[in-house]
Amino acid sequence: MGSNERIRGVVKLLLEKGAELDSKDNDGQTPLLLAAAKGHEAVVKLLLEKGAESPHFAAEMGMTEEFKYERLEYDWQLRIVELLPLKDGSKVCCKIHVIPGGDATELDPEYDAVREDTKKLPYRALSYTWGDSNEMHQIFIDDKSFLVRANLFHFLKEWAPLDGQGPAYFWIDAISICSWKGGLVR
């Protein structure tokens, strides 16, 4: 029996013993959302069969669209994350801005620092060991689903600006760099 089936068996037993189908954790995430975020397809099917509430499931899981990186056009460009106020008290949402790095004129003699289409944003740089890859949390970047590790998720929740506060900008290695097993893409 595979681990996904074992987890399904445990969830089934918990439900039979009276576990709440649509309970929420401290981050407002339901068992359905967590199972889908961790790729436990058998558990997702079980929860839906048992009647888990799912009116916004597709949108919450980004099933309509997952965040995809766009290739940077120039070596001197950076992806900066704008952290937005939390939605519904716990939903982490961000926007990506592509800006010229400080060394743009050194890397590209043709770069014109006074072009109207470029903007400088004050940002903080953040690089860290983000924790266990088995504990993933969903955030939204440009209204599209993106999974991050627990430490980064909790950082983003803690640092999210309150409504009415100014924007918070970060260069975060786990988001700003497009990476996958085997390589990096600018």
Image: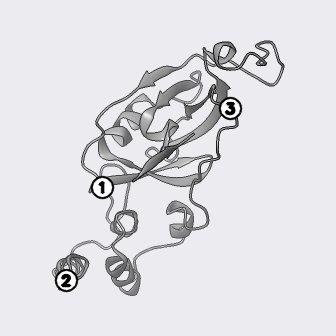
Q: Secondary structure at mark 3?
A: loop
- The kind of residue on which mark 2 rests is Gly
Q: Secondary structure at mark 1?
A: loop
Location of residue 169 in the rendering, given as x and y in whole percent from the top left corner: 54, 25
Q: Badge 2 local density, few (<14 within 10 Å), some, or many (20+)? A: some
Location of residue 25 in the rendering, given as x and y in whole percent from the top left corner: 30, 55
Whether residue 35 sits left or right of residue 82 in the image: it is left
- The kind of residue on which mark 3 rests is Tyr
User: In percent of the image, x 53 and y 35: which residue is there?
Assistant: 85
- The kind of residue on which mark 1 rests is Asp
User: In percent of the image, x 63 and y 25: which residue is there?
Assistant: 76
Mark 1 — residue? 25
- The disc placed on residue 9 is 2
User: In percent of the image, x 61 and y 37: which residue is there?
Assistant: 96
Q: Badge 1 local density, few (<14 within 10 Å), some, or many (20+)? A: few
Mark 3 — residue? 74
Marks 3/2 in contact by CB < 8 Å: the verdict is no
Marks 2/1 in contact by CB < 8 Å: the verdict is no
User: In percent of the image, x 50 and y 68: which residue is there?
Assistant: 57
Precedes in sequence: disc 2 or disc 1? 2
The N terminus - image quarter:
bottom left
Structural distance between the alpha carbons of marks 1 and 3 = 42 Å
The C terminus - image quarter:
top right
Location of residue 16 in the rendering, given as x and y in whole percent from the top left corner: 19, 84
Q: In the picture, residue 58 is in which quadrant? A: bottom right
Counting the numbered discs, the total is: 3
Location of residue 171 in the rendering, given as x and y in whole percent from the top left corner: 50, 28
Q: In the picture, residue 59 is in which quadrant? A: bottom right
| Mark in front: 2 vs 1 | 2
Whether residue 28 sits left or right of residue 168 in the image: it is left
